[in-house]
Image (cartoon, grey):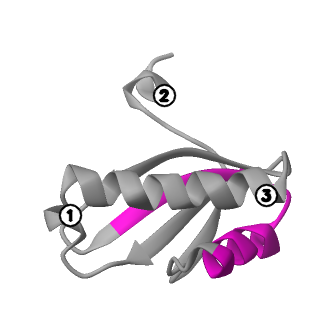
């Protein structure tokens, strides 16, 4: 299945308390359980005003459905075409 990067604009996301982040995570997991195995949350990165999430899903529509059901923004959804890291530079 394709992998996607979701950009969620959430003002002051970096100031969310551990309890608030836990509540967001619990809501996301609850929605995912209801959607079945066609969508999986891999991980997320919290910055000052955005949360970037990595998901595996059948298509972009599944990502949008999850966002809608969870009440989360999905301002930009990009399919990940590959990954690179420092080892990519090695022969």
Q: Which residues are magenta?
A: 51-69
Under circle 3, the secondary element is helix
Give the mark nearer the N terminus: 1 vs 3.
1
Image-based side of 81 in relation to 45, left or right: right
Disc 3: CA contacts within 10 A as few (<14), some (14-19) or many (>=20)? few
Occupied quadrant, residue 86: top left
Residue 76 in sight in this render: yes
Please give the name of the residue rendered at 84% of the width and 45% of the height, measured from the top-left corner: 37
Image-based side of 9 in relation to 1, left or right: left
Q: Is residue 60 magenta?
A: yes
User: Where is residue 51 shown, x and y percent of the image?
Assistant: 37, 65
When the figure is inspected, residue 10 is found, relative to residue 14, above or below; the finding is below
The nearer-to-camera label among 3 and 2 is 3
Instruction: Give the residue at mark 1.
Output: 16
Task: Measure the C-alpha gap from mark 1 to mark 3.
Answer: 26 Å
Checking the image for residue 88, the label placed there is 2
Instruction: Give the residue at mark 3.
Output: 34
User: Where is residue 59 shown, x and y percent of the image?
Assistant: 82, 65
Q: Is residue 89 magenta?
A: no
Closest to the observer: 33 or 44? 33
Residue 46 in sight in this render: no
């Amino acid at each position: 299945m394709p992998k996607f990067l979701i950009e969620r604009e959430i003002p002051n996301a970096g100031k969310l308390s551990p309890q608030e982040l836990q509540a967001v995570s619990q809501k996301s997991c609850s929605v995912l359980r209801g959607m079945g195995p066609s969508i999986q949350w891999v991980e997320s990165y919290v910055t000052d005003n955005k949360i970037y999430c990595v998901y595996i899903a059948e298509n972009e529509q599944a990502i949008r459905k999850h966002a809608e059901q969870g009440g989360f923004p999905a301002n930009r959804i990009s399919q990940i075409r590959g990954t690179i890291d420092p080892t990519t530079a090695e022969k």
